[in-house]
Image: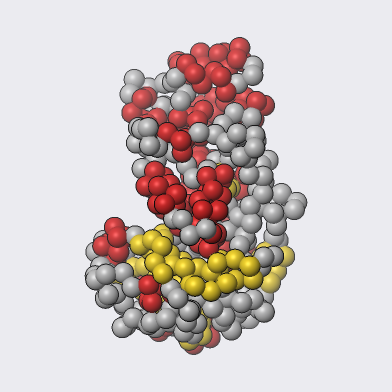
Amino acid sequence: MKIPFDNTYVKLPAQMYAAQRPTPVQLPALVAFNHSLAETLGISGDPDADIFAGNAIPEGASPIVQAYSGHQFGHWNPQLGDGRAVLLGEVVGKDRIRRDIQLKGSGQTPFSRRGDGRAWLGPVLREYLVSEAMHAMGVPTTRALAAVTTGEDVYREEVLPGAVLTRVAQSHIRVGTFQYFAARQDIQALQALTDHVIARHYPTATGPADLLDQVIARYAHLIAKWMGLGFIHGVMNTDNVSIAGETIDYGPCAFIDGFHPDQVFSAIDQQGRYAYSNQPGIGAWNMAQFATALIPLMPDQDAAIEQFTEAVNRFPDIYLNAWRDVFVAKLGVDNVDDDDTALIKDLLELMATDGADFTNVFAKLADISVRDQFLDRDAFDAWKTRWEVRKSPNAAQIMAAANPQIIPRNHQIEAVIHAGREGDFAPFHGMLSAITRPYAALTDTTEKYARAPTQNERVTRTFCGT
């Protein structure tokens, strides 16, 4: 198996990372391999479980772990870093995009903070499914290249089967990476990181201020896409905010079934900081932390504080415009006007009142059966009359492209994980096939993935997996 590595991060100042080989495992076995992604990356040869488990280092790799800090649930942690992941290196794909290849769950590192550096099978299957579904739904995201079992146990609240995920990202640089060097007043590393990010991700940016503007815009559009899918990230700490504008770190993430704007699934989010409705505000807060980290690079810091504050204050308007664009497409409207915001919000309020299924309401909005999702059907009928006036002549095509029939529903992921723990990966592969074709018409085989959970199937809490 050949991977065409072309590594650049290791050429940056040495304090930005530590050399680290993955820790070998006893008996690696391949669960899944993403052949189409491998083709894009220019990887050739048969998939090798030893490489994806960390037992063998492929030619050209330069395995490292990256340093970063972060605000975790609003609380500053000055040193985090890759505690259970090793970056093997970078490749420039056939599409000319540079990407990282990282092993997640590959053993202890200098940043493990007393953790074992391992992952168990459940979070690996969850991230594989959700990240590939997000990609299929057009959301910027990290990707899954491979998943392997390790033949070893992982000890959490119980003994669990170990696994390693091979994750692909445009980079693993985070807001927290900038915070790490800003907090240490390491201007050399901060400048080198900024130059690297501009060259790699934002080549039109002319400096830190322009970089901030572009990251804000990309991040606002990303969160708008999340909101349009009923997706809750669950742990929007600054160390989980990708500078490339991709969704990263699928820990206690979940998709809403019965809609409520204050929905929280994450077991570690006791105060609801990262609830569905809070995600845009937290997005602006995270961008404020990024702006703060860039201040030391500016020659006139007082002027920069004023300029960067104005930039962050533009986040809500950028987000709201992106959010409206996402939702009017879901309603089959192509000539947006100011009244559409009220039309969207009124539907969401009706859905929240009755706990209507988020995905299925939009997927079946033109179907008479959608009324059954609502208790107050007269109120829905009144809303629908307004909507009919706004629909575009080609609404069916617009809506079909904007509203997935299938999402990775929480209860179905849990069923896949349960089967995987028993050594049965057929449910995983069946679900993967369905969720990577989210806009296709339902068939006898895929219809079950579109069903909302029954009362007994509902998942109320999700877990980080660390």
221 to 100, vertically: above or below: above
Q: Which color scheme does this rendered protein use? A: secondary structure
* Residue depicted at 53% across the width and 69% down the height: 162
Q: Position of residue 382 (x, y in %)?
A: 57, 13
Position of residue 140 measured from the top left corner of the image (x, y, whole percent) = 43, 53
Image height check: is 366 above or below 51?
above
Q: Is residue 239 above or below residue 403?
A: below
Lateral position of residue 74 relative to residue 366, left or right: right
User: In the rendered view of the protein, which quadrant contains the N terminus?
Assistant: bottom left
Name the quarter where the C terminus is drawn.
Answer: bottom right
Residue 255: image location, x then y, percent:
55, 44
In the displayed structure, 264 sits above or below 361; it is below
Of residues 249 and 144, the one nearer the viewer is 144
Q: Residue at x 37, y 72 (%)?
A: 49
Q: How many marks?
A: 0
Could you tell me which residue is drawn at 40 percent across and 30 percent down?
399
Q: Is residue 128 visible?
A: yes
Judging depth in this view, the residue of 86 and 90 nearest the camera is 86
List x then y, in percent, for residue 50.
Answer: 38, 77
Residue found at x 41% / y 27%: 332
Front in this rendered view, residue 362 or 76:
362
Q: Depth check: 81 or 370 in front?
A: 370
Residue 166 seen from this side: no
